[in-house]
Amino acid sequence: MKAKRKPHRDGWPQELYRANLKALSRHHPGLAGRLEKTPLTGRYRVIASGSGEAMVFNLEMTAGGVYYHPADPLADVHKQIAALKLKNNLLAVFLGFGLGYELLIYLQHFAAVLGTRYVAVIERDLEMFKTALFCNNLAPLFENQRISFFVGLEGEELYVALRRFLEEEQKFILLRAMKPVYHASALSLHRDYYLQALRTLREAAAHQVIHFGNDPKDSLIGIENMLENLPEILSNPGINLLYNRFKNRPAVVVATGPSLNKNKHLLKGLENRALIISVDASLKILMNMGVKPHLVTSLERVPEVVKLIDGFSPEEVRDVYLAACPVVRREVYQAYPGPRIIVYRNFDHFRWLDVDKGILNIGPSAGNMAFKVAEALGCNPIILIGQDLAFSREGDTHARGTPYGEKQQAFYGEENTLEVPGNDGRPIRTSRIWYQFLKHYELDVAAYNGTCVNCTEGGAYITGTKVMTFQEAIDRYMTAEFHPLEIIHSAIAGFSARDSQRDADRVATIIEDTRRAMQRVVEECLQGLQKLAEHEPFLQEILAGEEVVKKRPSTEKQSGDRIDYKDRLAEIDREIMAHKNNCINGHPSFQLFFAHIFQSYMIKFEMEMCAVPEKHDSPEAARAEILLYHRDWFTTTGGLAGICVGLLERAGERLEQAL
């Protein structure tokens, strides 16, 4: 900056600040509210240079005369961003906001060239961010729905916010085309914070990918189980009949962590003072001590679940409702002689059925499921016991009496464990599996409008919960009787077998329509493969380089010596992608029935495709490689669709026999 540097002493320009804050309030009300409460302490002094529209600002960051920008702010920002040598930055993550110049310059000069689709701005300092609102017109940034701001967030609060950001419009798919954008001054101020923020972003993205599944084969198992469980779905009431029936009543979620040994005895006598929801692995522990839970959650698709709920007589579990997601194996229902309530997970294939039973945003564990069931029923507070999500201090994985033992080997292994804060304030070891459950709990608790009380008396701390002993929670929250079983019986009394028959007729038609649609997907994929085989030599030549393309026959050359292959590439692109689009858009069942099976593959495929341009200087070469990758897309998609044709044929035959 030139010598005509002077303090900005004319008072804060309130009109500009108010206009910026108004725009921020419309799109980011929470951040606007926190900014209004943030005092300006004088840590940053604004220095103005120039006049009118040409006026620019700098920050004096310390009393020692250290400035955010060492020279003219606009030129400095442009130079620093250019020095990052960014390429293919579909998701730009700004580490620090400064006075806003980095983002403004990036959008003006870099975003279009780099193909940026979304921007995340992470700024640690609320006061610095507030200062920027007095200096520049930032309203267009705040109103841009493709720009998100994460300001003054620490630890798990930042994780939850980034996880939600990545989930919206499946932004996590862009992670391999994500680049940080930063100014040296931001890193000098808060280097450790921003490096941790990047790690948090990557962790949130990894968990989001896992949430959508790791393998289409796993999803196929869930679909196959659902189709085999159609008689159960059609003939039993849904969780939606219980929505808000327990408004402001306490619920106790009983998981199977080792600390359950300490307080399970306190459940005796609470059956009429709390809605007791047990995970499947805790059922036998409770029944053996004479405590009957009202609901039992289950969602795993593996045969091992049978051992958790079998061996009871109909009389023993007459009033214990199995609230399972019908992706469990049919043998689970066959083994359990008690009543059922159907609980859908938020998968489109349950919408495809068009038989409304109630859909919940259920996380990866039966404990996560129990929490969401309690929330949907209107419970407040939700009280957790046995939800350790960690090894005990003695190294146990589960409570005594669980069918698979207290030390389950799948959770051990040094490479499989990490350290997290414990409920007692000390670090505690957890496994990678439990850590996923823990992070999803934090998402659920953050979105819950009530109070979540963690009475686990051991285990990992779940951010957002209130920690106390179970006896304290009983004395505070479970003082009045309200007879949960009577409420459940009353709520489901209106379920009609006549409605089930109408549903069955409609489902039979849906199954046949979808079978035909899946067969068309198989045929489109075969045609896509044929087109790729036809055009592969030309696409390979593009990848080999323009020199090879120049040697093609002169009849295929345009004017001059250079072949203009862009038009032909565009034509090939249209031909091949038409078959892909026909698969995806040709019938509603692709999204509603097939997407859950296909999504784990699709997510990884699209992540790989987002990263392809990084390897090429020529956009044509990048596009050629992406088209060639579609050989795998058509092969995998057609293969999965073919399996679904067989599943649907068998499901239709079974349903016809049942009708």
Image (spheres, rainbow, N blue to C red):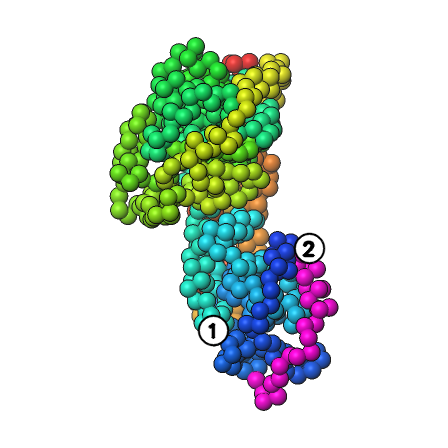
State the residue at coordinates (70%, 72%).
13
Q: What element carries label 2?
A: helix
Q: Name the residue under label 2.
A: 26
Relative height, residue 296 to residue 627 (above, below): above
The x, y position of residue 528, in whole percent, is: 51, 45
Magenta range? 1-27
Q: Name the residue under label 1.
A: 184
Relative height, residue 157 to residue 57 (above, below): above
Q: Is residue 422 left or right of residue 372?
A: left
State the residue at coordinates (51%, 23%).
273
Amino acid under disc 1: Ala
What label does residue 349 carry, if any? none
Residue extending furthest toward the right? 15
Relative height, residue 111 to residue 631 (above, below): below
State the residue at coordinates (56%, 48%).
168
Amino acid under disc 2: Arg
Q: Is residue 281 left or right of residue 243?
A: left
